[in-house]
Image (cartoon, helix red, strand yellow):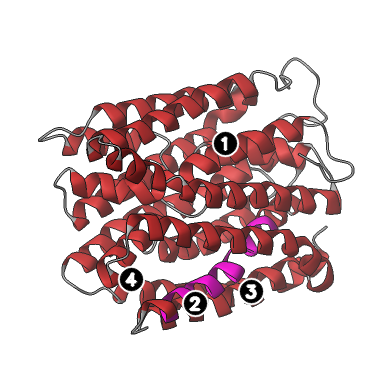
Amino acid sequence: MLLPAGAAPEARLLLIGRALRAFTDGFIAILLPVYLLALGLGTWEVGLISTATLFGSALATLAVGQWGHRFPQRRLLLAAAGLMCLTGLLLAGLGGVGDFWPLLLVAFVGTMNPSAGDVSVFLPLEHARLAESAQGEARTFLFARYTFVGALCAAAGSLATAIPHALTAAGLAQLDALRLMFVAYGLTGVAIFVLYRALPDHHVHEQAAAPAPLGPSRGIVIKLAALFSVDALAGGLIVNTLLALWLFERFDLSLVAAGQFFFWAGLLSAGSQLAAPWAARRIGLINTMVFTHIPSSVCLILAAFADSLPVALALLFLRSALSQMDVPTRSAFVMAVVTPAERAAAASFTAVPRSLAAAASPAIGGALFSVGWLAAPLVACGVLKIAYDLALWHAFRRHGEAAP
């Protein structure tokens, strides 16, 4: 993978690792509700398991922020890869009658990702390593490349949802076909473990600034974390798992068609993330985040009331073309406004409230679906996100102009 000028070679390993994880996330987020419904669980249980996943990721990320600076980042990344392997294999092995609580436990402690973005414990660790791999504008481009690779590979992964359908058509039982996909998720964790073994150990080679807990930047990080939590609370209402469920319930969309939708939506999202650094160069990081996010939220609200599938898909495609442009700019902004030694802690402490806030939302969204209020999660998500964007712009627009 090509790196931005000035980026360290180790960034290529991180980009490949992100690509592998995103590919598996792309099909797991769509197959998860199908798998759980096939086991006899309801829409509320689907939401609860998504909530457990996000809440567990939040606690793991908090632990990284609080105590991760005591350990080599490479060792923590290897541990996360091992946990990913166990998550996939355990989910594939469960699924019998009465296995809801074991499934909930695995979702809580594992690395499964039901959302469009990356919410796992990998995120703060990889962000800290990426921030060390480039400086200034090159860092923004590197984060854009990181999120672009993730979005592109997640889009490709969504097409893999056709594999269980093909296996079922060939005579394999549906549950067995779905379990094979979770096995593939676990084996990807093994591949990432091997890949990250090649990363240099920064506790062996002297660093310019050793990782440290939050200090001078604590105030601005807390303010950002509070705002990001509102955005995450909104996004959790309609994570990819629940968006797929909405399409299944609202328009009776097939699994193969849903996979195709998420593929094209992912491509639009990936392309927009590549454009984000150029937009940030011209109008600033904060303006790029806000002025692309608000129109995407309006599209989501309108999609909730669409009376035909083509109209709904068109609005959701337009949303996908805009909604993720804030991801690389947000990451670059956080890394730019804290000291180098605080970056790992800042990445964790801005990610933790996002995960905690998002953790409750899928259960709420699933409950609303279960009582027939199919439009409510989409509308609530859009309204909350618009409120977040306006508050962020008001609080940090001057920082955005000055941030490198």
Q: Position of residue 204 (x, y in %)?
A: 75, 14
How many residues crowd around disc 3 within 10 Å: few (fewer than 14), some, or many (20 or more)? many
- State the separation of the CA atoms marked 2 and 3: 17 Å
Residue 213 seen by the camera: no
Nearer to us: label 2 or label 3: 2
The residue to which callout 3 is attached is 292
Disc 2 marks a residue whose amino acid type is: Ala
Nearer to us: label 1 or label 4: 1
The residue to which callout 1 is attached is 20
Earlier-in-chain disc, 1 versus 4: 1
- Classify the position of the N terminus by image quarter: top right
The residue to which callout 2 is attached is 314
Which residues are drawn in magenta? 311-330
Earlier-in-chain disc, 2 versus 3: 3
Residue 394: image quadrant is bottom right
Q: Position of residue 44 (x, y in %)?
A: 20, 56
- State the separation of the CA atoms marked 1 and 4: 30 Å
Q: Residue furthest left?
A: 97
Q: Are marks 1 and 2 in contact (CB under 8 Å)?
A: no
Disc 1 marks a residue whose amino acid type is: Leu
Earlier-in-chain disc, 1 versus 3: 1
Q: Nearer the viewer, residue 96 or 171?
A: 171
Disc 3 marks a residue whose amino acid type is: Thr
The residue to which callout 4 is attached is 377
